[in-house]
């Protein structure tokens, strides 16, 4: 045995299993730790040596009765498999004539190059003193072996067996040996990593991105009824049956017939509904209040009066957007306000999806209503006139403009009166008068209050131009006598507005 040290070569005993056609059961790939049957092909009776000492052969070898693993597909392990459960039967007995024993024995998986397919080891079956035999029974028959994709890199078939350290005739431990007792086949499953590349908003109708493998199917949880496939350039475009309204995020799934699957999730930009107004104050008058009988009437009036409008953050159409307030009884509350009293009303925009804007607060001030003059002509002239040979009525050179502004309740009465002063120069009083003419009727206005017009407040109208129908036969004119002195004359017209009906 002097050459013993020269025999220290690595001996691997691998009992391999190969896929058997009769064991091929259609199984779905499960990307979890569910242990499913693995088809295998048994090795030779005493196993096939993979590496180690040449003398470390066997008189008797155990057999593998079953193999299960996680992430199995159609009876094959995949690149996602990390753990195998191997069930043994029988005993391992060293070659008696070679006079050696074994220790530190593990159930292991080897790649097609006969090297370990994982650095992680299972249970040490012979942790103590070396032995020449080991029987598998109920306490040790089921053993765990590990597999690491980075250490087998898709090589197939893989081998399942035992690795151990032989001890020759009481000498120190020799090189590790291994024998295979079964072969199994492996399928490489792809890790799919799809992406979503376009910005998602509430109104989005198409999701775009990149897939991992051309031809893979793309689906989305937000709209299960639609799907598309990954193009040759790995891009995809998934048209939705609607929009992403109401969604906070979406997840797309890339999958294929081989069982590969991967997902990508993206947030959906939360569309906001915004509200603005051209002003935040409004004034009510009796005429306004008479047309307000419900909350919706008040809101519609506020929208029109203060220029309320709305917009979406994504600039989409605001068709269907309405306005409302959480304050109720608006019409009655406004009508109960005293003159000069105020009330604040928060108004918000909303749509059919339930999206609401922040409110804009409008302060409403109530007014009892005012009757007053609107615009009135400040200067009216008659130009340069020739002294007439007989009494003559002259028209002004510009049209009169007199307006009544009335914000009182509809039906309220008003009357307009005019009084004229004598027309004078520095040295003379005009031989004649300002008159009010209405057809064939002429009324002298000098120092005499004369009814010019009267009317009733009309709902929805605040201004009345009482001079709108004045013409060559109606209006304030100048009546001049032939005895007039040539001179420049001036005077004034005093207007009076009353809220009493005429007799």
Image (cartoon, helix red, strand yellow):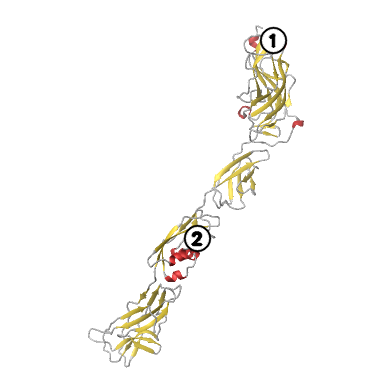
Q: Residue furthest left?
A: 427
In the rendered image, the residue lying farthest to the right is 22
Query: With 296 as the anchor, is 153 left or right in this view?
Result: right
Label 2 neighbourhood size at 10 Å, few (<14), some (14-19), many (20+)? Answer: many
Mark number, residue 99: 1
Q: Residue at x 66, y 40 (%)?
A: 256
Secondary structure beneath dot 1 equals loop
Q: Is residue 320 left or right of residue 373?
A: right
Q: Is residue 374 above or below residue 359?
A: below
Percent across and percent down for residue 181 are 71, 22
Q: Is residue 493 visible?
A: yes
Q: Is residue 279 visible?
A: no
Q: Nearer the viewer, residue 124 or 435?
A: 124
The percent position of residue 148, horizontal first and vertical second, equals 62, 28
Quadrant including the C terminus: bottom left
Residue 106, image quadrant = top right
Mark 1 surroundings: few (<14), some (14-19) or many (≥20) residues within 10 A: some
Q: CA distance from mark 2 to mark 1?
A: 97 Å
Front: mark 2 or 1: 2
> Which label is found at residue 323?
2
First of labels 2, 1 by sequence position: 1
Q: Nearer the viewer, residue 107 or 3?
A: 107
Q: Secondary structure at mark 2?
A: strand
User: Is 422 situated left or right of 372 in this image?
Assistant: left
Give yes or no for contact between labels 2 and 1 (Cβ–Cβ under 8 Å).
Answer: no
Place residue 122 in its image quadrant: top right
The residue at 67%/21% (across/down) is 162
Q: Position of residue 227 (x, y in %)?
A: 64, 47
Determine which quarter of the picture holds residue 276: bottom left
Rendered-image quadrant of the N terminus: top right
């Amino acid at each position: 045995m002097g050459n013993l040290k020269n025999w220290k070569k690595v001996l691997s005993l691998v009992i391999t299993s190969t896929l058997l056609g009769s064991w091929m059961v259609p199984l779905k790939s499960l990307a979890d730790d569910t242990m499913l049957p693995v088809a295998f092909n048994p090795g030779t009776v005493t196993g096939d040596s993979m590496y180690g000492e040449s003398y470390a052969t066997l008189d008797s070898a155990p057999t593998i009765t079953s193999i299960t693993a996680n992430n199995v597909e159609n009876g094959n392990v995949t690149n996602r498999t990390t753990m195998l459960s191997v069930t043994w039967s029988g005993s391992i007995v060293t070659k008696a004539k070679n006079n050696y024993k074994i220790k530190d024995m593990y159930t292991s998986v080897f790649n097609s190059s006969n090297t370990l397919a994982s650095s992680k080891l299972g249970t040490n079956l012979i942790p103590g003193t070396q032995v020449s035999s080991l029987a598998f029974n109920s306490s040790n028959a089921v053993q765990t072996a590990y597999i690491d994709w980075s250490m087998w890199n898709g090589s197939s078939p893989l081998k399942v067996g035992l690795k151990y350290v032989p001890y020759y005739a009481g000498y120190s431990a020799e090189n590790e040996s291994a024998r295979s007792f079964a072969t199994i086949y492996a399928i490489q499953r792809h890790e799919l990593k799809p992406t979503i590349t376009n910005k998602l908003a509430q109104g989005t109708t198409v999701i775009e991105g990149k897939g991992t493998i051309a031809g893979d199917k793309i689906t989305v949880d937000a709209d299960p009824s639609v799907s598309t496939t990954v193009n040759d350039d790995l891009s995809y475009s998934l048209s939705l049956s609607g929009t992403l309204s109401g969604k906070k995020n979406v997840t797309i799934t890339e999958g294929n017939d081989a069982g590969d699957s991967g997902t990508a999730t993206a947030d959906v930009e939360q569309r906001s509904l915004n509200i603005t107004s051209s002003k935040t104050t409004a004034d009510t008058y009796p005429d306004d209040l008479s047309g307000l009988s419900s909350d919706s009437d008040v809101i519609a009036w506020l929208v029109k009066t203060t220029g309320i409008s709305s917009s979406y953050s994504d600039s989409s159409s605001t068709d269907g957007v309405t306005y409302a307030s959480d304050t109720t009884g608006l019409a009655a509350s406004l009508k109960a306000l005293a003159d000069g009293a105020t009330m604040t009303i928060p108004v918000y925009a909303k749509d059919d999806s339930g999206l609401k804007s922040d409110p804009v607060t409008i302060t409403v001030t109530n007014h009892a209503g005012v009757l007053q003059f609107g615009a009135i002509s400040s200067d009216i002239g008659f130009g340069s006139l020739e002294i007439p040979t007989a009494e003559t009525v002259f028209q002004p050179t510009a049209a009169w403009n007199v307006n009544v502004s009335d914000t009182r309740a509809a039906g309220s009465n008003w009357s307009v009166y005019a009084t004229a002063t004598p027309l004078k120069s520095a040295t003379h009083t005009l031989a004649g008068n300002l008159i009010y003419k209405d057809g064939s009727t002429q009324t002298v206005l000098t120092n005499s209050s004369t009814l010019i017009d009267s009317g009733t407040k009309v709902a929805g109208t605040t201004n009345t131009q009482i001079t709108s129908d004045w013409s060559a036969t109606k209006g304030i004119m100048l009546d001049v006598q032939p005895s007039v002195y040539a001179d420049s004359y001036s005077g004034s017209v005093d207007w009076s507005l009353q809220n009493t009906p005429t007799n």
